[in-house]
Image (cartoon, rainbow, N blue to C red):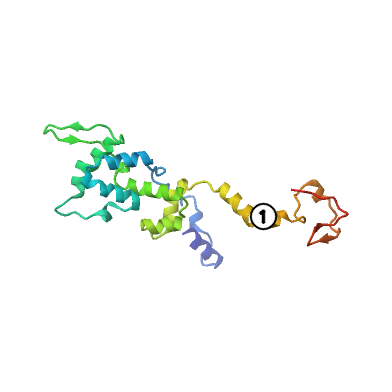
Amino acid sequence: MHGASEIAVDDEAIKKNPAKGRAAKVPAEKGGRTVAWSDDVVLRIVEGHAPEYRPIASVGAACGLRQGELWTDDKHIRARTYDELVWKPALFYAGVIAAPKTDRRGRRQYVSSRENGMHALRHYFASITLADGVNIKELAEYLGHSIPGFTLRLYTHMLPSSHERARKAVDSRLSRLFSLKSHVAVTEQAVVRSPTASWEPDDGLDTDQPQISL
């Protein structure tokens, strides 16, 4: 909206950009940062499943699939049944949620939240792939996001620091440049050097000038 209005102003279609008015406010982000489970928690959750159901949690964590992509409700398993009788007990086993209470009919009642649903396995998948170098564009494809920008907004805080990788990339690509005698550090000696001094492109500084090593 803001960008389109700016173009309209430039084209003199409108006098002012309405998106710049006091009444126009950028919507606040809903919720906080997405938090991913650790490897140990995910392993404990898988262990908390009965053997016949472990592939569900394992594939969810390894592929980042949505619950609806893992299976569809049929006579073998239904989402609500799985959630109450398999998933939540596994969360309790892993220490993610508290012990259940028992209602009047003797049924176990677990207190959980949306953050602890199966969707959390997708967040775990995103966290481990980003940590090992998968880029946002590829992750968006794996997760089925049509817009990589959405993936970036969701997981940008999980991206590992690349300062050291950037330094190594520059060093490895420009090592030949750094080794040339003509490459000098920006020091006071280099700054005061006469701009009219002769320069030897193949062998660095003129021999009459003081040499500066890196």
Under mark 1, the amino acid is: Ser
Q: Residue at x 67, y 55 (%)?
A: 175
Residue in the foreground of this view, choosing between 28 and 138: 138
Question: Is 93 left or right of 127, judged from the image as shown?
Answer: left
Residue in the foreground of this view, choosing between 198 and 181: 181
Residue 195 rendering spot, x and y as whole percentages: 84, 57
Label 1 secondary element = helix
Residue in the foreground of this view, choosing between 3 and 78: 78
Q: How many marks?
A: 1
**51 to 6, vertically: above or below:** above
Residue 79 rendering spot, x and y as whole percentages: 21, 49
Local packing at callout 1 (Cα closer than 10 Å; few below 14, some 14-19, many 20+) is few
Question: Is 62 left or right of 156, judged from the image as shown?
Answer: left
The residue sitting at the left extreme is 105
Question: Is 79 left or right of 60, judged from the image as shown?
Answer: left
User: Which residue is labeled 1 in the image?
Assistant: 175
Q: Residue at x 50, y 60 (%)?
A: 3
Q: Residue at x 30, y 48 (%)?
A: 58
**102 to 143, vertically: above or below:** above
Question: Is 170 left or right of 109, judged from the image as shown?
Answer: right
Residue 38 rendering spot, x and y as whole percentages: 38, 40
Q: Quadrant of residue 115?
A: top left
Q: Residue at x 46, y 47 (%)?
A: 131
